[in-house]
Amino acid sequence: MRLIQYFNAGARHVGWVQPDGDHARELNQVASVFELANLAIARKVALEPLVKELASDRTIDYADLLAKGQVMAPLEHPEPARFFITGTGLTHIGSASARNQMHISTHGDGAPESDSMKIFRMGLEGGKPDAGKIGIQPEWFYKGVGTCVLAPGEPLPLPAFALAGAEEAEIVGLYIVGPDGQPFRIGYALGNEFSDHLTEAQNYLYTQHSKLRACSIGPEILLGELPQDVRGKSRILRGDKILWEEDFLSGEKNMSHSIVNLEHYHFRYSMFRRPGDLHAYFFGAAVMSYASKIKTEVGDVFEIEAELFGKTLRNRMVALPDEGLVTVKVL
C-alpha cells in the first residue's frame, strides 16, 4: 500500500494510490499523513486497515496532480523544526567503493586505507546482529529539519559556496514518535540525499558540511515492511539527453546493516524520542554519479525510480545567489 499527500481545490489531502498507479482514493477525516499516523497511534491500530476504513469513493487523477506540481512531500510536520532529517552512509557496497575512489582521487593510490573503508568493513562484520542483539554502530549524519525537504518536482538549490552538487538515490525511513516516547515507523520512501562530494573529499571531517543541503523525498510512502531486495534506477538528464544512468540495489539483502540496527543507533538517543516529532532517516546510497566522474551542472535533472515505490522522484538543480559573508549582530 502506498500513500501520497497533495493539494487540490485549495485544500490538502491524503490519497491511497490505486493499483493502476495513476489514480488515488482520497481519505476522509485526515488532511495529512501526520494526522493519519497520530490517529493510528491513538486508536492502537495499524495504518493499512485504517487507510481502508477512511478511504472515500472520491478518486483523483494522481498523474495529473504530479504533472501540475500539486503533489507534496509524503510527510510533513505542522512545525517543520520538529521534523529531523538525518541519515547514514557506507551501508551499501557501491557507496563504500565510491567513497574509497573519492579518497584515492584526492590523496593518491598510496594513501592509507580510508576511515570510510574501515567503518564499512565494521558494518560487514557486525551490522546485522541476531534478533534482540545490538550490532556495530553505523556512520550517522544530521542533514537539517523539515524546511530542507523538497516536494517532487521542486527545484533543488545549489548554494553559491558549494563545490559540487550530486544526487544520492536512497531509501528513506519515515517515523513518528508517540505520546509515550515510542518511535513508530510510518513507512518508506524514495529520497535524493543531495550532497557535496567535493567538499567531503577535502577531509573526512568535512562530511557533515557536505550534507547540510536540501533533499527531496517521495512522491509516495510505502507502508509495511521493506522487501529484502529492492531494485531501481538513478539517472541525470541534461537537456533532452541522459547524461548518466545506473541501476541500484537496496534492501537488507544488499546492505551491510540491518534496518533494525540503524534504527536502534538513531533512536537510542532520548532527544530523538520526543513525543510528536517526525524523523526522516536516509539509509545510504548504492550508486552515485560522482563515482563515475560525472560533473553535474545547474539545470541538470535528477531522477530516481523503483517500481516498488510507484512514480519517479524528479528534481532540477538550480543555482542560489551568492550571499557573501554572513555576519552576526550583537544585541
Image: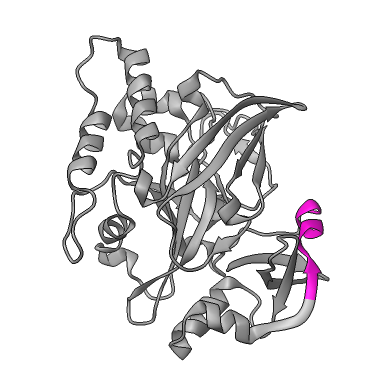
Q: Could you say which is closer to the camera, residue 212 or residue 17?
A: 17
Q: Residue at x 17, y 59 (%)?
A: 134
Report if residue 328 is visible in the image. no
225 or 289: nearer the viewer? 225
Place of residue 120 in the rendered image (x, y in percent of width and height, measured from the top left)? 26, 36
* Residue shown at 56% from the left, 64% from the top: 76
Residue in the image at 58% along x and 72% along y? 33
Q: Is residue 133 magenta?
A: no
Specify the quadrant of the image occupied by residue 286. top left
Specify the quadrant that holds the N terminus.
bottom right
Residue 119 coordinates in the image, percent (x, y): 22, 36
Asked whether residue 183 appears in the rendered view, the answer is: yes
Image check: 179 left or right of 221? left
Q: Name the image quarter holding residue 14.
A: bottom right
Q: How many marks?
A: 0
- Residue drawn at (49%, 83%) of the image: 40
Compared with 238, 19 (above or below) is below
Q: Position of residue 228 (x, y in %)?
A: 40, 54
Which color scheme is applied?
A: one colour
Q: Tell me, yes or no, whether the highlighted magenta stretch contains residue 65.
A: yes
Q: Residue furthest bottom?
A: 43
Give the extent of the magenta segment. 59-68
Residue 57: x %, y % from top left: 77, 82
Res 101 quadrant in image? top left
What main secondary structure does the magenta stretch of the protein show?
A: helix
- In the drawing, does residue 29 fall left or right of residue 260? right
